[in-house]
Each structure stands twice: as structure tokens, then as C-alpha cells.
Image: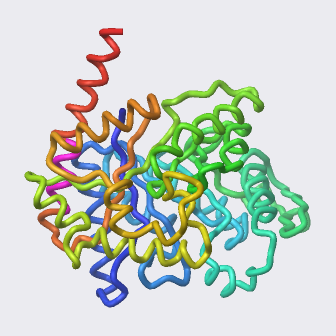
Amino acid sequence: MKLGFFIMPVHPPTRNYAETLREDREAFILADRLGYTEGYCGEHLTDLAENIPSSLTFCASLAGFTASIKLGTAVANLPFSHPLLVATQAALVDNLLQGRFLLGIGAGVLPSDAEALELLSADRGAMFAEAIDHILALWAGEPPYDLRGKYWNISTVKTVWPEIGVGGVVKPYQKPHPPILGTSSDPNSKGLVLLGRRGWWPISSHFLHADHLPSQWSLYAQGCTEGGHKPDRANWRVARTMFVADDDKTARAYAGGDAKSPYRFYMSQLTAKLRKGKRLGGFKARAEMADEEVTLDYIFDNLIIRGSVSRVVDDILALHDKIGDFGTLLYCGMDWADPVLARRSMELMAEKVMPAVNAAIGKRAAAE
């Protein structure tokens, strides 16, 4: 099991913006130094707490400061940009990183982003599907381009000048293109089937109750089979909200118990948005649970992995027992309310927790 990193991010809107960007970059640089294999960031245009408007730009900012970690978007919201811009900018980032790039894509879920772009009533699912088809066609094709769609047309037929390079687009470093991923926060997401059909990789969200994760794999594997691809659990990413400290008391306080906990702030922000949109189903252990039952205390007792090294190891192994093998465990980063504790948690995950987890999994496999 590999260890990866993810941030939405979520910061108190009152914090200095430049400071939070510096902090988020420091987290990725630390993850690279500690051996985290991949790291992702989200994006929103109109959210002062989730304050990275371009995940591609953020990944590009880390190109000269990281050495081995793969960097990804989670996700680039395709309906909110012209496909030509995404295709060329993603190719640029892939080349800057010399192949250390992962393209996570989505249709955009924040209503205020859609409203600001006059897309609130648009069929963003259809726009998403057309956008990725255009992007792949640009990467696979040669000029002159002449792509037609309902939402975008892309042509260089009238102005192509191949002798000096005009009318062509830059291509990704990875061939035929970077790995493509999609996230799932719906317990019964049909999007997982679509991901599998196209041979793309799934990320199961950190606000899905663990009881929903087995069905996530089943839906993805179904899609792989339908699309003629072999389902490979190594391609499955599972995100979890986690915090490790040198003792259980510190971990419980910082990761939810304290009123000023960054984990409590994070979940307060997240559940407020999902509650308003009637999208709390992922948190629920039982479908019949009322929304009122999804309290912060319920979330911290049922969806958060927190504690000393030994406790977190046990909880991750219990998760593995429940859902089976998966390729990468994504550690979800929070606001660094206490930078020392935040860094220490990332260090303990990489240096103590994951070696113990993998040793235990290996020992069990050898005994079977």
C-alpha cells in the first residue's frame, strides 16, 4: 500500500492568502521529502476557504521544488474552462514535471462557481464528457484541428502554418497522455462505472463511510470489465481523514476534540455545504439515517482515523480487512493551525505508520 497526499484545501477565510498558499506548498514539499508517492489539490473559483482557483497552476508551482512525488489535480473542473486551455496547460505541467503529473477531472460541484460562469443551469455532465473527448483528440491528433461539439468547436484549419509550427498544440510528456482519474463521493456512483469503462483510475472520497467503499470497488470493476480493461486494485486510491500524534490524547484533541481543531473547522465547512445540497449520504453508515444524525461527533467517531502510531496502524489494517487491497492511501491535509503537530503527523504516517501497515499486510499474505 502506497501513501499519497491530498488537500482541498480548507483554510479559515480570515487567514492571509499568501500565507496559506506558502503553507500548502510546504506540505507538498514535505510530502515529497518523506516519500509520499503522489499528491493532489482541488480547485474552486469562488470559495475563500477552498482557495486554490487553479490546481494546474498550483502543481506547476511545485515543479522545481519536488523531486519524485507525482502531482495531480483533484479535480480540474472541465466545464469551467475551454478544452484547448486545459489540454495545453495540462501538457505544459506534465512536461514541467517530466511525467510526474496525474490529471484528475470533474464536472464542477460548487454552485457559486457555476453561477459566476453563467453555467448554473447548464448540463455540466454533458459539457464534461465533450471537454475530455476534445482534450484527448487534441493530444492524439495533428494539425490542422477541426473538432466539433455542442459546447465547443476547435479549429485551426484556416490559419494552420505547419512549416513554422502555427496551428499545432503542445503534447504531454507521458504517452499517449497522463493517467486520468476521477473522484467519487457518492455511495452508489455510476461515475465509477464510466471511469472503469474508459480505463481511468478512481479516487474514493474521504467523506465516504468505510461501509460504502466495497461497493465503490465493485462499481469500478464492473466498468473495467464492460470496457475490456482488467480491474487492478493497485489503481484504486482511497482517501481518509487522518491524524497521527505521539499520544492518543493529543491526536484526539487536535483532530476534532478541541473547539479550535482545524479538523473540526474542516468538517464544519464541508458538512454545511453538503447539508445544504442534501448530499450527506456518503457520511451515513445506514441509508435510513436522518441528516440530523450526521453530527460532527458522529463524523469524528466514525470517519476519522486519529491517534498514536499503534492506534492508526490498527485502524488502517481494519479498513484493509473491510475493503481488501487498494493501491494508495491518500492522507488528507488540513490547515496548519499548529505547524509542528501537522508536520509531525505527516512524518509519523510516512516513517512509522505505513511501514508497520505494510509489514502486517505482507505477513498476513505470506501466511495465506
Q: Is residue 344 left or right of residue 232?
A: left
Relative to residue 151, is residue 327 depicted above or below? above
Residue 174 figure quarter: top right
Q: Position of residue 168 (x, y in %)?
A: 74, 57
Taking 232 as reference, is 253 left or right? left
How many marks are shown on the rendered structure?
A: 0
Q: Is residue 362 magenta?
A: no
The region drawn magenta spans: 342-350
Task: Decide if residue 7 is in sight here.
Answer: yes
> Along the line of sight, which residue is nearer the eye, 356 or 315?
315
Compared with 217, 299 (above or below) is below
At 53% across and 69% down in the image, what residue appears?
Answer: 291
Residue 368 versus residue 56: which sits nearer the camera?
A: 368
Can see residue 95? no
Q: Is residue 309 left or right of residue 146?
A: left
| Image quadrant where one finds the C terminus | top left
| Residue 348 falls inside the magenta stretch | yes
23 with respect to 162 (left or right)? left
The residue positioned 27% from the left and 72% from the top of the image is 262
Residue visible at 29% across and 19% down in the picture: 362
Q: Nearer the viewer, residue 72 or 356?
A: 356
Q: Position of residue 1 (x, y in %)?
A: 36, 32
Residue drawn at (31%, 10%), measured in percent from left and top? 366
**Main SS category, magenta section:** helix
Above or below 305: residue 290: below
Residue 7 point in image, percent of width and height: 39, 62
Percent of width and height locating residue 88: 64, 61
